[in-house]
Amino acid sequence: MFFVHLSARDYFTSGDGKKVLEGTVATQHRRTADCLLDAMDSKLRRDMCNLQKPGARIQEATGRIKGSILLQIAYACEYWIEHLSACPQDSHNVLSDDGKTHRFLQRHLLYWIEAMSLLNKIPVAIAAIQKLQSILTRKVVAHSA
């Protein structure tokens, strides 16, 4: 969310104005994370660019990547964990055992890594997994306290 006037930003981020938007941004991040997981769940699959060779170089596959379903979920692949991490800690029930994220990772983790590789985003994938691990660690610590 971007504010045109700094005074509006100040009002909505502190004092009484904060109550107006409280939960709204977090709720949107939660909904967005859910939608991104759904999009990836329906589209990620093995060899989604039909490269047919596990050792194919990205440079050789550029044409197939541009015409593939991968570009439809590129944002989802790159940013789903960012949206998930922007949710308040108490809304992380999506991270529970057999929750949406757990089921997604069981079914699609390797396909997600393949997609991130084809998008040339492996460093982003590593950072995202580290962020997810951090969220889960905080959740476990909070739950055991």
Image: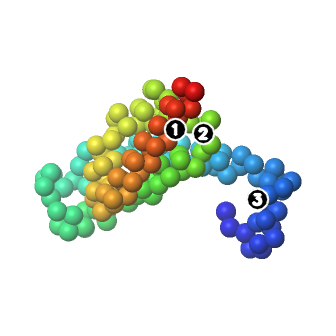
Numbered tag placed on residue 13 in the rendering: 3
Does residue 117 sit above or below 96 in this rendering? Answer: below
Amino acid type at image mark 2 = Gln
Mark 1 against mark 3, which lies toward the viewer? 1
Q: Is residue 51 left or right of residue 82?
A: left
Residue 57 at x, y percent in the picture: 17, 62
Does residue 127 sit above or below 87 in this rendering? Answer: below
Would residue 45 be seen by someone viewing this image from the given angle? no
N-terminal of the pair, mark 3 or mark 2, is: 3
Amino acid type at image mark 1 = Arg
Numbered tag placed on residue 89 in the rendering: 2
Q: Residues within 10 Å of mark 3 (few under 14, many from 20)?
A: some
Tell me how far mark 1 sits from mark 3, CA to CA.
25 Å
Instruction: Check the image and tell me how it is coloured.
Output: rainbow
Residue closer to the observer: 44 or 132: 132
Residue 89 at x, y percent in the picture: 60, 39
Q: Residue reaching furthest right?
A: 16
Q: Residue at x 47, y 55 (%)?
A: 79
Tell me how far mark 2 sits from mark 1, CA to CA.
9 Å
Q: Are marks 2 and 1 in contact (CB under 8 Å)?
A: yes
Numbered tag placed on residue 80 in the rendering: none
Q: Residue at x 33, y 41 (%)?
A: 109
- Judging by the rendered image, the residue that carries numbered circle 1 is 138
Residue 121 at x, y percent in the picture: 33, 60
Amino acid type at image mark 3 = Thr
Callout 2: helix, strand or loop?
helix
N-terminal of the pair, mark 2 or mark 1, is: 2
Does residue 132 sit above or below 11 in this rendering? Answer: above
Tell me how far mark 3 sits from mark 2, CA to CA.
19 Å
Q: Quadrant of the C terminus?
A: top right
Residue closer to the observer: 57 or 15: 15
Callout 1: helix, strand or loop?
helix
